[in-house]
Amino acid sequence: MKKNKIIFWTATIIILLWEGVMPLGTVLFAPGYVNAGTKPLGYPDYFAYALIFSKVLGVIAISVPSIPAKLKEWAYAGLTFSLIYAFISHACVDKNITYMLLPIVVLGILAVSYIYNRKVYTNG
């Protein structure tokens, strides 16, 4: 059980930092770069703020143990869709393999968090 918790929290903290803290830090400390990732893909400026807001809410939901399981499921789903669409956007627009692989790697870490969340908190 201890191994499962360590794996869950390691994966979840990586997601928390990558999908929550870094984007929020950009808004707070480098607002000129908020849309640096979305503008080249053709998305409007406001989309970056909506994406950051959604990611921060999602990582809060998956990181706080007292959040109900159904809400966690929705948060994992939302973060999953975000990463899949990031891959698709990069594959269609800039075709840069590094930009395409990064969301897939983060998605793999998110999957580990999800799988071990279920092992730790639902005994299965």
Image (cartoon, rainbow, N blue to C red):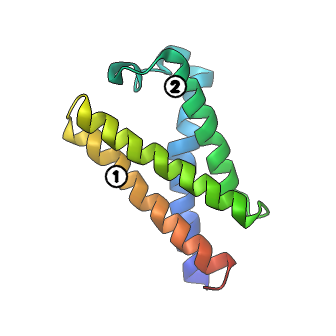
User: x, y (%) of residue 42?
Assistant: 36, 20
Marks 2 and 1, how far apart in space?
19 Å
Lateral position of residue 118 relative to residue 69, left or right: left
Q: Which of marks 2 and 1 is nearer the N terminus?
A: 2
User: x, y (%) of residue 111?
Assistant: 46, 64
Q: Which residue position holds label 1?
A: 104
Choose between 8 and 96: the one closer to the eye.
Answer: 96
Q: The C terminus appears in which quarter of the rendering? A: bottom right
Identify which residue is drawn at 56% across, 79% down: 4
Identify which residue is drawn at 56% across, 59% down: 12
Amino acid carrying mark 2 in the image: Ala
Identify which residue is drawn at 54% across, 46% down: 17
Residue 117's place in the image compared with 50, above or below, is below
How busy is the neighbourhood of tag 1: few (under 14 within 10 Å), some, or many (20 plus)? Answer: some
Choose between 37 and 9: the one closer to the eye.
Answer: 37
Residue 73's place in the image compared with 20, above or below, is below
Q: Do the residues bearing badges 2 and 1 touch, measured as CB atoms within 8 Å?
A: no
How busy is the neighbourhood of tag 2: few (under 14 within 10 Å), some, or many (20 plus)? Answer: many
Residue 50's place in the image compared with 74, above or below, is above
Q: Is mark 2 on a helix, strand or loop?
A: helix
Q: What element carries label 1?
A: helix
**Residue 85 circle label:** none
Q: Which residue position holds label 2?
A: 48
Amino acid carrying mark 1 in the image: Ile
